[in-house]
Image: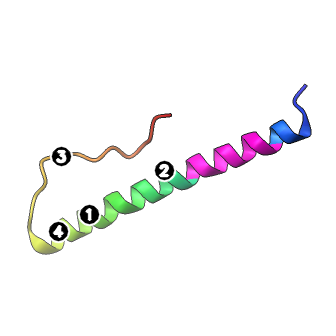
Amino acid sequence: MISNSEMIRIRRQMQRRIRDVVAERRRARMMEAHTDLTGESTETDTPLTTTV
C-alpha cells in the first residue's frame, strides 16, 4: 500500500512533468509562429515530449 506522503510525492512529480511538457509545447508553438512570421526555416525538429 502507498503511504500518504508517497502519494503526495507521486502527484507532485506527475504535475511537474505535465507542466514541463506543456511549457515545452508552448515554446515549440512560439518558435513555429516566430518562423512563420519571419519566413525563416529551421532544420532541427523540436521534440514535443520529454523523457525522464
Instruction: Determine if the magenta segment contains residue 9.
Output: yes
Q: Which residue is mark 4?
A: 36
Dividing the picture into quadrants, the one containing residue 39 is bottom left
Numbered circle sitting on residue 44: 3
Magenta-colored span: 8-18
Whether residue 43 is situated above or below residue 40 in the rendered picture: above
Q: CA distance from mark 1 to mark 3?
A: 11 Å
33, 15: nearer the viewer: 15
What residue is drawn where x is 91% and y is 25%? 1
User: Is the stretch drawn in magenta largely helix, strand or loop?
Assistant: helix
Q: Could you tell me the amino acid type at mark 4? A: Asp
Q: Position of residue 51 (x, y in %)?
A: 46, 35
How dense is the environment of label 2, judged by Cα within 10 Å: few (below 14), some, or many (20 and up)? Answer: some
Q: Could you tell me the amino acid type at mark 3? A: Thr
What residue is drawn where x is 87% and y is 30%? 2
Q: Could you tell me the amino acid type at mark 1? A: Met
Q: Are marks 4 and 1 in contact (CB under 8 Å)?
A: no
Q: Which residue is mark 1?
A: 31
Whether residue 41 is situated above or below residue 50 in the rendered picture: below
Q: Nearer the viewer, mark 4 or mark 2?
A: 2
Quick one: label 4 or label 2, which is nearer the N terminus? Answer: 2
